[in-house]
Amino acid sequence: MPKPKRLGIHVIGPRYGESVILALPDGGIGVIDSFASRTHHPVMDFLKSQFPNQRELRFLALTHPHADHCYRIADLLGEFTVQEVWIFQPWPLFLVQRYFETLSDLGSPDEVEKAMGLPNGSVALSLLEFEKRVGALLKTKKIKYRALAGGRVFDLCAGQVKVHFLTPGDQQQYTYQTQLLKATKKMSADGKSLNNFDNLPTPDHNLASGALLVEFGKSRALLMADAEKELWDEWLASTPVAKLNPVHFVKSAHHGSLNGFHGGLYSEIADPATTIAVVTPFSKGVSPLPSEQGITSLRECVKNVYCTNRTVAAASSTLLWKAVTNRLLPSLPPPWVKQITSKRALAKLLVPEVGPKAPTGGPEPALPANWIADAQIKPSLWYLIRPDLRIPLPGLVAAEDYSVSAYLDNKGNVSEVKAGYEAGILS
C-alpha cells in the first residue's frame, strides 16, 4: 500500500539562524527564511541532503530583514528554480535597503549582523542581491510574487493545503515603515555626530515579520517567524474568536523570548493535550535565547516543547532539555582520558553523555591542541566535544543534527516527530 500523504515541517537552527522547510503532500518543497555564515549555508546543505533529487522550490518566503533569517537567501534562487516568492512588506525594498545602506555608510553593523559576527552591510548586500534576482525573474515572468502581509489566503497542492498570511497587519506595517523612514532621515542628517553607535535609531524589524498558518485537511500549523506581541495584539483584535481553531504544531516566535510569547494567542489556538511547539535558540549577542520566562510560559500552553539545539537552550534558559535522538559516540581516546584524570576541569569541554562528571565552578580550560589535532584526523571525535566548542569543518556539523521535523496527517494529528542529535525536548 502507498504511504499516506503527510505535511512535513522541518525546523532547522544550529544557534545563529532559522529556517522552516515544508515538504508538501504532493512532493513539493517550500522554504521559509534562510540563514548562513560567511562560509557555511546550512539551509542549502539540509535541502541537498534530505531532498537530493529536488531542483525546484514551490515557494521561497522571506519574513523580515534580520540577518538570522535573510543572510545569503539569494543563494537559493541561484541553486533552485523557484515558482513563487513571498516577501514581507515593504517591497520593493527601497526604504529597507536605504536604511541598511545608511547604517553601513556610518560604519555601524546592524544589531543582528554584529551578534552573528558578520561584516557591516551584510544584510544590505543580501537584500540587494535578493531583490535583483527576484526582479529579473519577475520581468521574464519566471516567478510569481506574493506580498507576505496579513489577511491573504490561497491554496497549494490543488487545494489540499491552504495558506493564511496572518501578520503583519496594516497598523504594524505602517508603524514599521514610519520607523524606517525616521531612522534613515535622522542618520542621514545627523550621522556625522552620531559617533556612539548605541544611540543610533533602530527600527523594530520584527514588526514586519510575516507569520503563516498552514492547513492540511483538519491539521493546522502556525509558523510564527519573529512575530511578537504587537503583531498578535492587532491580529486578535481583528479576528473573530469563532475562527480560532486549535493548531497542532507551532514554530514559536523569536527564538523563545518572553516577548515572542503571547498568552492571549496561545490560550485561543493551543491545546495543552495535543499541540507541540518548536523553538530555535539564538546564542549570539548579549541576550541569548530562549529565555527561562519565555519557555516556562510556553510550556504551560502546549503538550511538548522541542528545541533545535539543546546545549544553547539549556545555557540560556537554565532549564533541562533531554536528547530526543541518541548518537552512537566513539570512545574517549586514551590520551584524553589520561589528561582528564590529571585535570578534571577538562571534563567541562565534553558533551554530558560522555562523562566523566565535570566539576562545578572554576574557570573553563582551553580546548587542548592534541584534541583538536585528533578530531581533525578522526572527525567523529568532534562529537565528544561540546557543540559550541567544535571548530567548523565542511561536512562536520550537519544541518539535520540541529533540526526538529514534525509530520502531520490530514486528520488533525502529528503522526511523527523526528529530531536531530543536537535537538532536545523540555523535561
Image (tube, grey):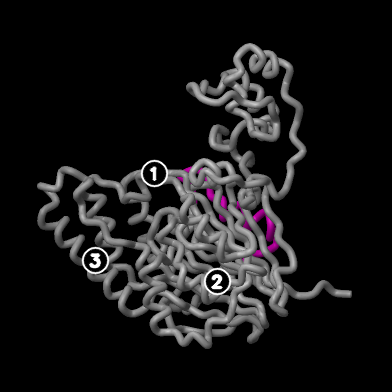
Determine the image quadrant of residue 301: bottom right
Q: Within the magenta stretch, is there residue 40?
A: yes
At which x and y percent is residue 424? Answer: 63, 49
Task: Identify the residue at image location x=50%, y=46%.
Answer: 317
Q: Nearer the viewer, residue 37 or 354?
A: 354
Image vertical order of residue 223 relative to residue 154, above or below: above
Say the numbered circle drawn on residue 285. Answer: 1
Find disc 3 in the rendering and name its residue.
179
In the displayed image of the protein, which residue is found farthest to the front? 300
Q: CA distance from mark 3 to mark 1?
A: 23 Å
Say the numbered circle drawn on residue 389. Answer: none
Image vertical order of residue 256 relative to residue 1, above or below: above
Q: CA distance from mark 3 to mark 2?
A: 27 Å
Identity of the amino acid at label 1?
Answer: Gly
The answer to whether one can see residue 78 in this image is: no
Q: Nearer the viewer, residue 14 or 236?
A: 236
Task: Identify the residue at image location x=52%, y=76%.
Answer: 268
At which x and y percent is residue 344? Answer: 61, 18
Considering only order in the chain, which callout, 2 or 1, is on the residue closer to the N terminus? 2
* Local SS, label 2: strand
* Local SS, label 3: helix
* Local SS, label 1: loop
Q: How many marks?
A: 3
Identity of the amino acid at label 2?
Answer: Leu
Boundaries of the magenta span: 36-56
Image vertical order of residue 15 relative to residue 341, above or below: below
Number of residues whose C-alpha sits closer than 10 Å to that of mark 3, classed few (under 14), some (14–19) or many (20 or more): some
At which x and y percent is residue 76? Answer: 52, 60
User: Label 2 near label 3: C-beta < 8 Å?
Assistant: no
Say the numbered circle drawn on residue 222. Answer: 2
Q: CA distance from mark 1 to mark 2?
A: 27 Å
Number of residues whose C-alpha sits closer than 10 Å to that of mark 2, classed few (under 14), some (14–19) or many (20 or more): many
